[in-house]
Image (spheres, rainbow, N blue to C red):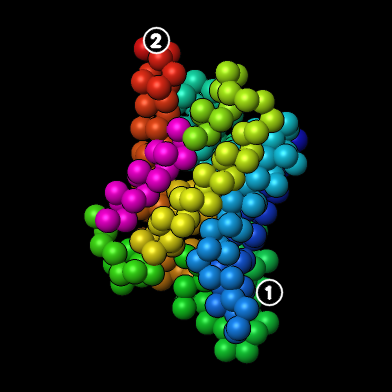
Amino acid sequence: MNKYAAELFGTFWLVLGGCGSAVLAAAFPDVGIGLLGVSLAFGLTVLTMAYAIGHISGCHLNPAVSIGLWAGGRFPANQLLPYIAAQVVGGILAGGVLYLIASGKAGFDVAAGFAANGYGPHSPGKYSLQAAVICEVVMTMMFLIIILGATDRRAPQGLAPLAIGLGLTLIHLISIPVTNTSVNPARSTGVALYVGDWATAQLWLFWLAPIFGAMIGAAIYRFVISGEPS
């Protein structure tokens, strides 16, 4: 149970820290942190949790990562569902805490976005469904390659959290304008449920595309980059 609790609290921190920076601080008058700050915040949540709980649960914090690690031969299938459930619960709890904080400001309107992921009219840059699918698949694919490479037994020891955290920062710098960056179904679910309406209607994409991308990334690393026999 300690693994599942670690995943719950780790994902809670990822959603609260990452989405919280977007909702509360990104456009704060005069000293807003902007796209760069939000990207860095997501990377820092993973970096800090990797050191805090990596030795307990592996610090997945993401259903797509758990599935990708399973596809990459690094994670047992019998722990997938409990991990995913813990991650989703952690994301939803963080969304609730963020909602309670954000709603304390006069004029707050959850329909304005609440850091939810979207495409078409709900994409920050008004990117199409096709662009959103390609972006989420490719970004999650690269994220899994980074994770599997950084945690390979042949990689420099102790530096994986830095590579993974900075990798997630880079992913956000690229893709926030396209989808608000998911690459993580738990992160998307954690805020979409509070927005409802269009956010839950488009949530399917932010489950399917990251999972598909993660499995591609795992296959590429396992059978092409690392040369593991099929």
Q: Is residue 136 visible?
A: yes
Q: Which residue is mark 2?
A: 229
107 vs 230: above or below: below
Residue 100 % position (x, y): 67, 73
- Residue density around tag 2, few if under 14, some if 14–19, many if 20 or more, within 10 Å: few
**Which SS class for mark 1?**
helix
Q: Which mark is residue 101?
A: 1
Q: Quadrant of the C terminus?
A: top left
Q: Residue furthest bottom?
A: 106
Q: What residue is shown at x 53% (from left), y 63% (from top)?
A: 36
**Which of the two discs, 1 and 2, labels the residue nearer the N terminus?**
1
Residue 104 % position (x, y): 68, 82
Mark 2: amino acid: Pro
Q: Would you say 125 lies left or right of 3 here? A: left
Q: Identify the main secondary structure in magenta.
A: helix
- Residue density around tag 1, few if under 14, some if 14–19, many if 20 or more, within 10 Å: few
Q: What residue is shown at x 58% (from left), y 23% (from top)?
A: 155
Where residue 218 sits, quadrant-wise, is top left
